Amino acid sequence: MKPNFIQKVTNWGNFPIVEKEMRSEDSFRKIKDFVLDHNEVIARGNGRCYGDASLGEHIFSTKKLNKFISFDRLNGVIECESGVLLSEVLEISVPQGYFLYVTPGTKFVSVGGAIASDVHGKNHHAEGCFSEYVIEFTLMNERGEIIKCSREENSDKFWATIGGMGLTGIILTIKFKLKNIESAYIRQESIKAENLDEIFRLFEESESWTYTVAWIDCLQKGKDIGRSILMRGEHAFQHELPQNLTKNPLRLKKKLEPTVPFYFPNFVLNSLTVKIFNWLYYKKQSKKEVKSFIDYETFFYPLDAVNEWNKIYGKSGFIQYQMVIPKETGREGMKKILETIANSGNGSFLAVLKLFGKNNPQAYNSFPFEGYTLALDFKVNSKLKKLVAQLDEIVQEFGGRIYLTKDSMSKSSLTNYLKNIQNPKFVSLQHKRIINNN
Amino acid sequence: MIVLGSTSEVAQAFIEKALQEGEKFERIYLFTSNKETTERFARHIDVKFLQQSKVIELDLTKEIDYNKFDSINSNLLFCATGYLGEGTEEGLYDNKNTERIIDINYSKLVPVMNYFAQKFESRRSGTIIGLSSVAGDRGRQSNFIYGSAKAAFTAYLSGLRNYLFDKKVHVLTIKPGFMATKMTEGLPLNPKLTATPKQAAACIYKAYKKQKNTAYVLPVWGIIMMIIRNIPEFIFKKLKL
Ligand SMILES: Cc1cc2nc3c(=O)[nH]c(=O)nc-3n(C[C@H](O)[C@H](O)[C@H](O)COP(=O)(O)OP(=O)(O)OC[C@H]3O[C@@H](n4cnc5c(N)ncnc54)[C@H](O)[C@@H]3O)c2cc1C
């Protein structure tokens, strides 16, 4: 058997699935050979983007770039290779009293992927994107050279790479800052909102909270449209913690991690089951407002509690549709979007609403800008293309755009917003799709 | 802990597993033919576990200066050294390939193992873990040069176990089966029969703690190899395995 490295590769949404060359190396010299020997290379982290962003003709997986380089425990500065997962960073940093400044809704993304998508969390309005806390990184360029990028050194490459979706080269190592925490717990308040007006009001009232996010029941129509639960949180100080948590405030107990054993058959997720799920979720909280202390995993990564939950969507896969609409027109836009979804009958199991704060103009390739963002999961089926096209029209009308790391079928006028990334060496299937306008 | 073949992902995963389980080592001696990547691993375990280690170059294809290893002592030796080389079709009549496979998997490796075994013997304690291969269980046409070297290595470990038994040193033979590592990357392996380095490390750690003599990483390989070993030769020789 001669290795050919051709394999089936797909990202978190299991759509699309391609058969391409994928390799992983831990030696920088061999990575250089790989880059020089191939046209159309793209880096891939942990495949937690939903669509085709980290797929390409020749995929370089950073799976083996998984080593830590240094950890300044005094100042909370950590340096590691790009394939290290955020979960691995937390494993060593939380017991030392440090947390990630910015984390997406899953901890199973690589730090390289976090830069390439310049991920945001529930604190964008307060603390911005992941890149704000990046001190420097090294990048392998099209000539196989390793260049150091920071705000001072090669700053053009630094900013192009942030949110640049792997199109500027392969990020090899990263140095970034962590934030101090006193406990591994979050002081949380969750508040029910009857409709869109109320949830928008709650968001604006909660601007002083570090973390805010809302879960929306997106099958509601009419006056109930936007029925939702807002969750807001702060890292708990030690003195606030309830007695039972004060003994080991920086350590969490080991939890069971169930795994979805196989792809669910297609009939399992339909508009009825989604409706029931959403109803249960909303009704679970009987009071208008609940205050509690919960561990950081439950607060930030509720979905990670079930391994491979993406299999629930069946073999045909699913997409995530995430857009941002400017603040001024955001409410009206969101309303239209939710109406369109409710009318389509194509329910979303998971719909998350957030208010983004001001963007960093230097990070011109980052997705977020001030406004409302909604992320929706949709099962891939025959009706989906039409729904996406309808939603795209609305996003366009309201001056919004689509998050590339979730995109796999939106129209290119909403996705073609990256700058300074033209480089024939590093090309993803997504980028080809976008520039070919199909 | 002494590690031979420290760039091996299984060896690295085993070290991490042991440290996670709270094992303490005064120092880990990382023998390697690739200093660059091993030094990165050494830093990694220092950051993650505050574990001291020392990287030592060892190229089995060259003359070895044992004097340099004088001061090295430990209670655990993990040997993951291995070299797959070219399979039969490409590499059978290439003497360089044949020699390299036999050298790295057996003939040049065994003296190094013996050197450390002697230290263990004189201390009358410790465990030696050797990664052999299911390929050594029976010679198959696809890669029997590698298989024969591993067969010899398996026999060596078995004899060493026997010899060191009453000297209070334990020897564990691991037969990994398919593993998703550098050695097999790009090969179309059946995922049900393939272990990740992490899985392998967990199995090996368990076998080490239980003082097993030999262990397959995935239990299914025990069954597969039992069948393969028991196929009568007059049938086996006609099979395309
Ligand atoms: C359950 C879930 C929740 C999520 N929640 C959020 C959220 O709240 N906020 C948010 O912003 N995102 C969120 N995401 C998306 C996720 O954070 C991003 O897609 C992230 O980039 C994935 O990282 P990865 O390591 O898996 O990279 P991949 O998915 O493998 O790749 C993503 C992109 O990064 C590039 N890339 C990866 N590694 C490198 C590298 N070393 N050098 C150069 N380019 C590289 C790839 O080319 C690709 O363009 C979520 C995803 C999931 C599955």
Image (tube, coloured by chain):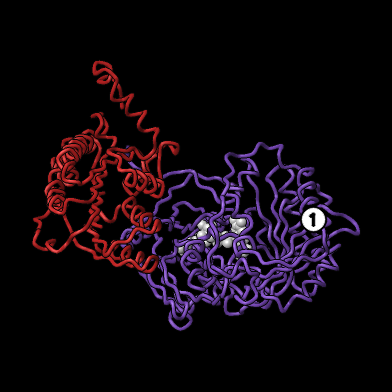
Which corner quadrant holds the N terminus of chain B?
bottom left
Query: Which chain letter goes with mark 1?
Result: A
Q: Nearer the viewer, residue B100 or B219?
A: B219
Q: Is residue A405 visible?
A: no
**Which residue is label 1 attached to?**
A282
Residue B214, horizontal then vertical, whole percent:
28, 38
Quarter where residue B31 is shown: bottom left
Chain represented in purple = A
Give the chain letter for red: B
Q: Does residue A77 appear to the left or right of A182 in the view shown? A: left
In this view, the residue farthest toward the right is A223
Q: Residue at x 64, y 57 (%)?
A: A302
Residue A302 visible to the viewer: yes
Where is B164 relative to B238, above or below?
below
Locate residue A84 relative to residue A355 in the image: left or right.
left
The x, y position of residue A209, in whole percent, is 70, 76
**Does label 1 point to a residue whose CB lies under 8 Å from ligand 1?**
no
Report the residue at 84% width, 56% height from top: A339
Query: For this view, does B89 lie left or right of residue A309?
Result: left
Secondary structure under tag 1 reads helix
Q: Along the line of sight, which residue is nearer the eye, B216 or A86?
A: B216
List the single residue furthest toward the bottom: A152
Give, as a three-letter code, the residue at label 1: Tyr
Q: In x, y percent, where is residue B153?
A: 19, 39
